[in-house]
Image (spheres, rainbow, N blue to C red):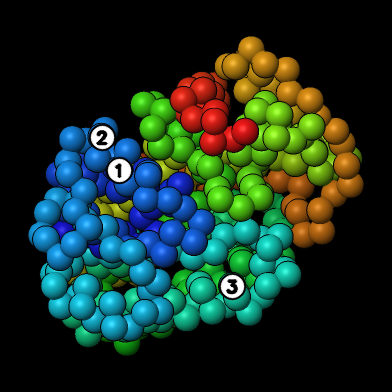
């Protein structure tokens, strides 16, 4: 298939692009590089031995550097390429930052998505996969979390994801021939086994694994653990950590599922289907690396939920997808990525 991946230079997007190329698809990336670099795409090219083109040259792997809200560039892109599917990963993604800049998140995430979906309709692209988030569930008391249960979102970032899901649902109702899937990610972690692509955000990291990397590199004195008084197995927050490789493969499964349908809208969780605490992640990382992680307990962050982990039975039943890689493999691959790129963390 010929697939447009927005935000394809980012952590999640780059691993999706790699898996798509390895599954014999043609991939075009659009990315503003606001919180990513072109280097991840060049490294994908090294892994796959597929050249990256950056001009209007039809190849297996192409990159365009612009923002989705740039209508002129969007018009040219869709005029030059005939896409069979869109995987929409682009957007700002920090829950904490979104509380400080809610308008920026609404503009970057929602407005940009509307521009993209308008082009999809105009150019008869009927297959859309949207990178959503488990944050749309808000606070839940019953685990595992199923796709049909929603709570009250706890930050503007989560609200943008939920609004985009609702826009896509309405879009399908108005155009029943479209195939739309929303994939609700839980907590992507790890890196490709080559150590060439992984998670290294430009800005101050919000996610656990990059914060651990910063402590190991000496960039941060200690890892702050936000609360140890939750009613969980060891008092620290519990999340569903899924290897980025498993998550990426979920998108190819979604494309395969779409090929079997003629008009559908569906939502799937992507997680391991089990929860791990912050302390369990630290222990697994220490075992994989042989490095002791300095840590400090501090107060809870507003809006953080005690635990969140996915029901993945729907994805397994309908798409034939399930996560294969365990917590130890997650930490081993992350450590390999760190060792190969440790200068980036110093």
* 193 versus 158 height, above or below: above
Report the quarter where the C terminus lies: top right
The answer to whether marks 2 and 1 mark residues whose Cβ atoms lie closer than 8 Å is yes
Residue at the image position 87 percent from the left and 36 percent from the top: 297
Q: Which residue is mark 3?
A: 105
Q: Left or right: where does residue 208 sit relative to residue 198?
A: right
Q: Position of residue 148 (x, y in %)?
A: 53, 63
Which of the numbered marks, if any, corresponds to residue 46? 2
- CA distance for labels 3 and 1: 28 Å
The answer to whether marks 3 and 2 mark residues whose Cβ atoms lie closer than 8 Å is no
* 108 versus 33 height, above or below: below
- CA distance for labels 2 and 1: 6 Å
Q: Residues within 10 Å of mark 1 (few under 14, many from 20)?
A: some
Q: Quadrant of residue 136?
A: bottom right
Report the quarter where the N terminus lies: bottom left
Q: Residues within 10 Å of mark 3 (few under 14, many from 20)?
A: many
Q: Nearer the viewer, mark 3 or mark 2?
A: 2
Which of the numbered marks, if any, corresponds to residue 243? none
Q: Earlier in the sequence, mark 3 or mark 1?
A: 1
Tag 2's secondary structure? helix
- CA distance for labels 3 and 2: 33 Å
Q: Nearer the viewer, mark 3 or mark 1?
A: 1
Is residue 275 something one can see in this rendering? no
Q: Position of residue 181 (x, y in %)?
A: 36, 63
Q: Position of residue 120 (x, y in %)?
A: 26, 77
Q: Left or right: where does residue 101 sit relative to residue 221?
A: left
Which of the numbered marks, if any, corresponds to residue 42? 1
Tag 3's secondary structure? helix
């Amino acid at each position: 298939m010929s697939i447009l991946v927005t935000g394809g230079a980012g952590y999640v997007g780059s691993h999706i692009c790699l898996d798509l190329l390895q599954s014999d698809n043609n991939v075009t990336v659009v990315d503003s590089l606001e919180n990513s670099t072109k280097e991840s795409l060049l490294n994908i090219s090294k892994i796959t031995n597929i050249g990256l083109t950056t001009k209007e040259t039809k190849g297996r792997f192409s990159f365009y550097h612009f923002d989705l809200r740039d209508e002129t560039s969007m018009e040219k892109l869709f005029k030059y390429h005939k896409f069979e599917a869109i995987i929409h990963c682009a957007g700002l993604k920090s829950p904490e930052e979104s509380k400080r800049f809610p308008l920026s998140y609404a503009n970057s995430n929602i407005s940009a998505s509307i521009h993209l979906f308008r082009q999809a309709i105009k150019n008869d692209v009927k297959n859309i996969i949207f990178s959503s988030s488990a944050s749309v569930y808000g606070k839940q008391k019953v685990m595992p979390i199923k796709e049909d249960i929603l709570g009250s979102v706890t930050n503007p970032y989560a609200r943008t994801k939920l609004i985009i899901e609702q826009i896509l649902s309405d879009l399908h109702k108005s155009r029943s021939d479209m195939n739309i899937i929303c994939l609700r990610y839980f907590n992507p972690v790890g890196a490709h086994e080559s150590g060439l692509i992984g998670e290294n955000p430009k800005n101050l990291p919000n996610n656990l694994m990059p914060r651990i990397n910063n402590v190991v590199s000496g960039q941060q004195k200690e890892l702050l653990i936000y609360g140890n008084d939750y009613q969980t197995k060891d008092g620290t927050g519990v999340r569903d950590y899924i290897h980025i490789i498993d998550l990426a493969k979920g998108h190819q499964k979604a494309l395969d599922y779409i090929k079997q349908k003629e008009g559908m809208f569906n939502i799937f969780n992507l997680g391991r289907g089990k929860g791990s605490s912050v302390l369990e992640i630290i222990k697994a990382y220490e075992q994989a690396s042989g490095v002791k992680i300095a840590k400090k307990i501090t107060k809870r962050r507003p809006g953080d939920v005690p635990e969140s982990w996915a029901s993945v039975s729907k994805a397994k039943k309908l798409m034939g997808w399930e996560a294969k890689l365990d917590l130890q493999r997650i930490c081993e691959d992350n450590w390999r990525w760190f060792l190969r790129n440790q200068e980036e963390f110093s």
